[in-house]
Image (cartoon, rainbow, N blue to C red):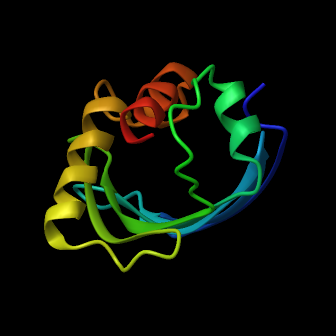
């Protein structure tokens, strides 16, 4: 199973949804928070996520990804907005490991990868195991 443990806090009022989730995955954990206004004409989910990877071998094994190189990513920070109707993402911030914050060109590259692999059909594609695996194969 991809998700080992999930803690999700939702707060709803006046059409707004705020959330905080903390989940354990094989080889690491994911922490995300965000909000959306569901009564808006064109709702967008704002998100701010941190992915901590403490065992890259375990993560890759779970997705049946062969370890091509020794490139180790121990942390990924990402924030932006997802348009729920258009299946588009707008990345505001991206930082991988100890590298500098991603440049505009890098954000555009990751935007295209995420839309192509995770949001290709609808928003719920971000939870699809095969979609996540395809994205991981492209960036590893």
Q: Is residue 124 visible?
A: no
The residue shown at (51%, 19%) is 130
The residue shown at (76%, 56%) is 54
Q: Say if 125 sits above or below 84 in the image.
A: above
Q: Nearer the viewer, residue 15 or 46?
A: 46
The residue shown at (29%, 61%) is 40
Q: Say if 62 sits above or below 113 in the image.
A: above
Q: Say if 2 sits above or below 88 in the image.
A: above
Q: Nearer the viewer, residue 20 or 54?
A: 54
Where, quadrant-wise, is the N terminus in this rendering? top right
Q: Nearer the viewer, residue 27 or 112?
A: 27
Percent across and percent down for residue 8 are: 75, 56
Percent across and percent down for residue 113 are: 27, 41
Residue farthest right in this picture:
5
Asked if residue 13 lies left or right of residue 24, the reply is: left
Residue farthest front in this picture:
70
Percent across and percent down for residue 96 are: 46, 66
The residue shown at (36%, 34%) is 138
Asked if residue 53 lies left or right of residue 116, the reply is: right
């Amino acid at each position: 199973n991809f998700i080992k443990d999930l803690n999700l806090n939702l707060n709803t009022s006046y059409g707004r949804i705020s959330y905080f989730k903390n989940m354990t995955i094989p080889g690491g954990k994911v922490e995300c928070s965000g909000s959306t206004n569901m009564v808006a004409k064109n709702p967008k989910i704002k998100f701010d996520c941190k992915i901590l990877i403490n065992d890259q071998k375990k993560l890759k094994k779970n997705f049946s990804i062969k370890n091509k190189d020794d490139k180790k990513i121990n942390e990924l920070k990402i924030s932006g907005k997802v348009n729920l109707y258009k299946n588009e993402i707008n990345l505001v911030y991206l930082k991988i490991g100890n590298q500098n914050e991603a440049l505009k060109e890098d954000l555009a590259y990751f935007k295209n990868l995420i839309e192509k692999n995770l949001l290709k059909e609808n928003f719920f594609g971000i939870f699809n195991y095969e979609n996540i695996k395809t994205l991981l194969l492209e960036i590893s």
